[in-house]
Amino acid sequence: MNKIDRPTRSLLAAAQILAIAVLAACNGIVAGDVVATTVCHATGDAANPYESLTVTPAELATHVGHTQDIIPVPIGGCPTAAAVVIDGKIIICHATSSTANPYNEITVSANGLNGHGDHQGDLIPAPEGGCPATAVASQGAVTLTVCHATGDAANPYEQITVSGAELTTHLGHADDIMPAPAGGCPASLAAVGDGKIAICHATGSATNPYNKITVSTNGLSGHSRHEGDLIPVPEAGCPGISASASAPASEGKVTICHVTGSKTQPYAEITVDANGLNGHDKHQGDIIPAPAGGCPTSKP
């Protein structure tokens, strides 16, 4: 059996201590004469997979040996979903600042994160479905307002603001929409397929006011801030005339003709949210948007 002589063992031990000290110094905070490091300690609890701990260099040696721990705590906080650690490495989405390719999916060491722990905008770990095709993090603190699908038909979305750590969880929710559109979350559940939804993109053309396009639910392909877009597509399809022709001055609203069932007053002219249309996109007979001359006085 091969044996390591005493001087070699001493050298290896010293190298390990030096490596831990360098890791602590690079990623820690000085507390008196001791350099402390914050780590994401894997708990084994699916609901709360990580505990953020501040440890001394001596304690750090133990956590370096924990294969599922992440060191140091990323700038956005510990992940809210357990990262898959294989051979001491995890997959992250590195923010590139490119509009066309906002993220690079890369593999980094769980111990040290190859320096990505303090990178603003990186998603650690990568979402289960892969890195988003459009940037989802706002400038400054990594927070984002999202439409979280509730599963409740009456109130299909809850508009919430999440941190970068929580964001990775919502990226894995197939029916969530992020960021929340400028006009607010849809009032009816959008049909999501392969991470995409159909919307009516406002063209500004009087003859062809909308293009029906498919966009990613993660980022909405930049359409979250487009004034006049209808998110999602109404059940009857995109309107043949522009909603702006009859929309009131307030942003994110559209005027429609709601069918009443009355013979004398077949339509009621009402104003609803452009995003989701308050569920009227599923009302058979509603005219969306209302014609420029007002609602008809008789049914066609």
Image: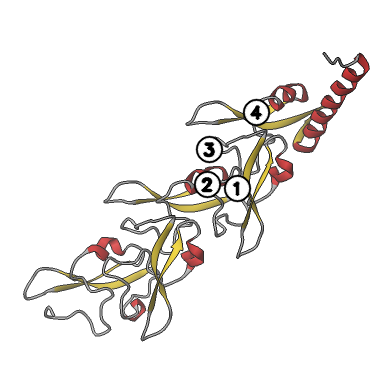
Give the residue displayed 71% in from the left and 22% down from the top.
Answer: 62
Badge 4 density bin: few <14, some 14–19, many ≥20, Cα 10 Å: some
| Image position of 131 with respect to 2: above or below | below
Q: Position of residue 220 (x, y in %)?
A: 47, 62
Mark 2 residue element: helix
> Distance from label 2 to label 1 (Cα)?
8 Å
Mark 4 residue element: loop
* For the residues bearing labels 3 and 4, Cβ distance under 8 angstroms: no
Badge 3 density bin: few <14, some 14–19, many ≥20, Cα 10 Å: many
> Distance from label 2 to label 3 (Cα)?
8 Å
Question: In the drawing, does residue 280 fall left or right of residue 263?
Answer: right
Quarter of the figure with the C terminus:
bottom left
The numbered mark, 4 or 1, whose residue comes first in the sequence reads: 4
Give the amino acid at mark 3. Answer: Thr
Give the amino acid at mark 4. Answer: Thr
Give the residue displayed 47% in from the left and 46% down from the top.
Answer: 172
| Image position of 182 with respect to 177: above or below | below
The numbered mark, 2 or 1, whose residue comes first in the sequence reads: 1
Residue placed under numbered mark 2 in the picture: 167
| Image position of 174 with respect to 45: above or below | below
Question: In the drawing, does residue 233 fall left or right of residue 19?
Answer: left
Residue placed under numbered mark 3 in the picture: 80
Residue placed under numbered mark 1 in the picture: 123
* For the residues bearing labels 4 and 2, Cβ distance under 8 angstroms: no
Q: Nearer the viewer, mark 4 or mark 2?
A: 4
Badge 1 density bin: few <14, some 14–19, many ≥20, Cα 10 Å: many
